[in-house]
Amino acid sequence: MAQSFPEDVLEHVFSFLNHDRDRNAVSLVCKSWYDIERLSRRRIFIGNCYAVSPEIVIRRFPDVRAVELKGKPHFADFNLVPEGWGGYVYPWVVSMAGAYPWLEEIKLKRMVVTDENLELISKSFKNFTVLVLLSCEGFTTDGLAYIAANCRNLRELDLGESEVEDLSGHWLSHFPDNCTSLVSLNISCLGSEVSFSALERLVARCPNLKTLRLNRAVPLEKLPNLLCRAPQLVELGTGAYSAEIQSDIFSNLSEAFLGCKQLKGLSGFWDVVPAYLPAMYSVCSQITSLNLSYATAQNPDLVQFVSQCGNLQRLWVLDYIEDVGLEALAAACKDLQELRVFPSDPYDAEGNVTLTEQGLVAVSEGCPKLQSVLYFCRQMSNAALVAIARNRPNMIRFRLCIIEPRAPDYLTLEPLDAGFGAIVENCKELLRLSMSGLLTDRVFEYIGTHAKKLEMLSIAFAGDSDLGLHHVLSGCESLRKLEIRDCPFGDKALLANATKLETMRSLWMSSCSVSFGACKLLGQKMPRLNVEVINERGPPDSGPEDCPVEKLYVYRTIAGPRVDMPGFVWTMDERVSSRFSRATEGHGD
Amino acid sequence: MERASAAYENDLNLKATELRLGLPGTDESSEKQSSRNYKRSSPEMDNSCQKDEQKCVPASKAQVVGWPPVRSYLKNVLHQKNDSDLSGMFVKVSMDGAPYLRKIDIKVYKNYPDLLKALENMFKCSIGVYSEREGCNGSDFSPTYEDKDGDWMLVGDVPWDMFITSCKRLRIMKGSEAKGLGCL
């Protein structure tokens, strides 16, 4: 019956499908639906840039307008992926420059981008409007100058938390005088001062500017100049929030904020001087998103400010908020959905703030919509975790980092298996979980049994044996990303669940007990996986076969082994036995 | 920024009393620095060595790489107390025309005005910082520093945190010589 619809009717119907999952489902119905879908797909999301090649993507989807790519594994954020590992956007930009002249959007996460890449982007795509670079590296402010100068209709430039080599602030002045299209500008990661007058003029001539995230170098005294020219702002990231205490600075600031009737999000706040926080009181009740993770203010200034924001949905804050601040938050912010508490002193074993499990329990009790948590603390108990689980069965992201590895329940000295077990058992929609503290194989049994919707799991310093890993790989049906460090997981569980790995995006294991021999075997058995061994201290075959590899990264791919590996990365595939001098031991297939 | 060194375990040594699954004598393996571990044949055999090593770890523990999982971006922003902080960061300070050099610990200062006030006190002169807003405030001397790459830079351009990590020595230049740097 579907075949009686003319193609353009189907195409029109498909134009309402925006999610990849829907479009992927539609392509599986029949050949003609596959063809119509692929010709009309405009947005591509590639969660692992090595899972597919640019050529394959272009061949299937010839008319794409927006591309999103992710490169390095998540643990790269914590320096576990050595420099030079990969994630180069270069081959993608080169291919797309030829194949997608109408490309409008490029979003990259954890990729290596060079100034040449940025120049090519700025010159290849006439309708280019959106560039988002999250946690990227490899480029300088010279590359940004190309984007500013050549992208006539640029709407969004978001540098996320990228590592940019800051040669000068002059790049911003490359935006031409007739550029009025900016909607979102995030330069918060940049160190050097941009020309304030250029910034001021840019902001003034972009009437649609909704998001402006400044860098630390923009002084507080100048902030009102910008706010007055952009009262329509919805999201503001301040520069350094400090100045000498002067009443005219304060009154200018207050007045400027008073004019920002649309403001919903605040961030920035480097070097915060608490006396200036009340300047924002007029907008506090509008604020739904507040990022104070750079604000070194303490209580009572901190809690006083946060408590003003009764409509808060998202709060990122340092542990200076303490339990008392979180209790106040629980009372004042009933719409809170996401809480992230970062450690002010991550390397101090003792800590000098009173932030414990009590704060998190209070928020879980007081905030019925709380569904996403990232919490760094120094003590935890099973009782607290059970309470949190019972209070918040609607939790979908739960990431707990107890600073001391393998810390037990501080009340009973038991492992925290029961606590995390309660989380996975009660929170049936849990999508993401990160665990810490003392954990045995038992917690993995709970996870394998209950965490059926879990898509991403992060494990560190946990477990006793391969049984733990086996529970996860065999039980977690929805698992897409698994990252493990410093756990006694080895060959058995990995090889027994080899086929599971093809259903996932990727597996990372570092400082575990996976032997070189097992990696070779896995690579040989599973041609559609790239099994990459990262060994910085030398080739993996310089020790015996059962020697553990330093780091292992396994991911499914239809592009075959990658060709841009540095010297410390080896791929295990069918040809591996000829590459290494040692013969593999006689494992039957 | 790969810190491959110093991956010591923090062990509370409660393993003797904890209940867990697994064969007696099995224990976690961990990445360690010494090359002999690279050749170990099984994780179990190493654990006795591991426990002995842990007892030798000093009270101020060295950091485990990438733990706690805080992004370096966040770390750089906050004022931290590291072991390395205990040693201070002494740099030589020379002033044009003065016969002797001085040494100061730049970690003691919180920001540029703090540092300059201290230098002014030390050398009994007035020192101006160049800023885009005000120029050199018309003083006789301007502070410069040698950075990690060996280049001589004008003090004040980069954020303070970046400055203290890249400053290797200071030189207070006489006004006439500082002309080329954009000051009067």
Image: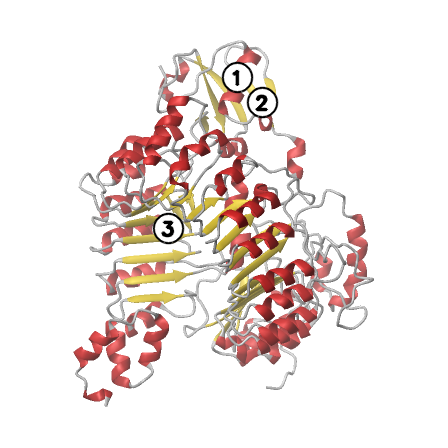
- Camera-side mark, 1 or 2: 1
Viewer-nearest residue: A584 or A256: A256
Residue A268: x and y in percent read: 43, 40
Residue A233: x and y in percent read: 31, 43
Q: CA distance from mark 1 to mark 2?
A: 17 Å
- Chain letter for the residue marked with disc 1 in the picture: B
- Camera-side mark, 1 or 3: 1
Which three-letter amino acid code belongs to the residue tagged 3? Thr
Q: Quadrant of the N terminus of chain A?
A: bottom left
- Chain letter for the residue marked with disc 2 in the picture: B
Q: Quadrant of the C terminus of chain A?
A: bottom right
Whether labels 1 and 3 belong to a single chain: the reply is no
Which three-letter amino acid code belongs to the residue tagged 1? Lys
Viewer-nearest residue: A528 or A219: A219
Other-residue count near label 1 (Cα within 10 Å), few / some / many at <14 / 14–19 / ≥20: some
Q: Residue at x 60, y 63 (%)?
A: A389
Q: CA distance from mark 1 to mark 3?
A: 41 Å
Whether labels 2 and 3 belong to a single chain: the reply is no
Report which residue position mark 3 lands on: A114
Q: Residue at x 35, y 23 (%)?
A: B133
Report which residue position mark 1 lands on: B117
Residue A403: x and y in percent read: 65, 51
Viewer-nearest residue: A137 or A320: A320
- Chain letter for the residue marked with disc 3 in the picture: A
Whether labels 1 and 2 belong to a single chain: the reply is yes
Position of B60 with respect to A305 (left or right) is right
Query: Residue B19 occupies which quadrant of the picture?
Result: bottom right
Report which residue position mark 2 lands on: B92
